[in-house]
Amino acid sequence: SAVISQKPSRDICQRGTSLTIQCQVDSQVTMMFWYRQQPGQSLTLIATANQGSEATYESGFVIDKFPISRPNLTFSTLTVSNMSPEDSSIYLCSVDLQAARGPGGYTFGSGTRLTVV
Amino acid sequence: QKEVEQNSGPLSVPEGAIASLNCTYSDRGSQSFFWYRQYSGKSPELIMFIYSNGDKEDGRFTAQLNKASQYVSLLIRDSQPSDSATYLCAVNDYKLSFGAGTTVTVRA
């Protein structure tokens, strides 16, 4: 299965600052997904990132707050901008291997645990 | 996002017993379904996927799908303490929508 490297693994940030999270996949994938998991909660999709086009954001998430880059088929970044304590969550990137390798489901990176103080 | 509901937990079972996890989904057109296991502090790990009505078995895990009832379940046979985790049901319509998860504790 694909290896997904996500960094940083954790960070503590001051409110009002921004953090960029990187996600690197060891194979080319069409779509990359960014999720948020708030403490004690399930996963919520933030946006879908396709190479060469603007990311598609889910309801409740906007580009100004969560800008995404997708410069090529193996890499994406998510920036959490102007952070507040409510942004303290785990952020996860995910890729869908199904199209490339047959049924396989989605694989997740190891996550970035963000604490905003 | 699509609605995905899981039976509320936590679920506590003795070692060696069967743990039964249930999930319903709102979109009748949904085609593929996944079960993830998430250990505390870790990212979700795919354990089962199912596309067709009926049962699918993989080791001690059995996924069951009933599209008419919009229902998918996961059975864990011969539960082990290492199965203690949160289990997430997900529905795939070109992106995953997750249920809230059910936390399972297997008592030794």
Image (spheres, grey):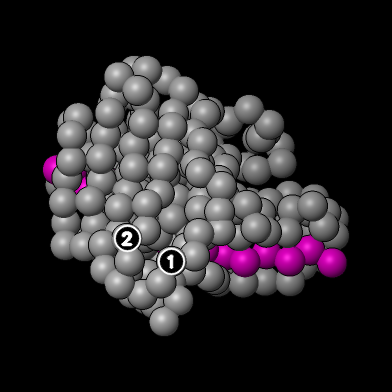
The answer to which of marks 1 and 2 sits earlier in the sequence is 1
Q: Chain of mark 1?
A: B
Q: Chain of mark 2?
A: B
Q: Position of residue A49 (x, y in %)?
A: 45, 38
Q: Which residue is mark 1?
A: B13
For residue A71: magenta?
no
Query: Compared to A66, does A53 lie above or below?
Result: above
Q: Which residue is mark 2?
A: B18
Q: Which residues are magenta?
A: A102-117
* Amino acid type of the residue tagged 2 in the rendering: Ile
Pick out the residue farthest to the bottom. B108
The image quadrant that residue A8 belongs to is bottom right
User: B93 or B82, which is in the foreground?
Assistant: B82
Give the residue at x 44% y 55%: B87
Tag 1–tag 2 contact (CB < 8 Å): yes
SS under mark 2: loop
Q: Position of residue B74 (x, y in %)?
A: 32, 49
Does residue A71 appear left or right of residue B100 in this picture? left
Q: Position of residue A27 (x, y in %)?
A: 25, 55
Q: Position of residue B70 (x, y in %)?
A: 37, 25
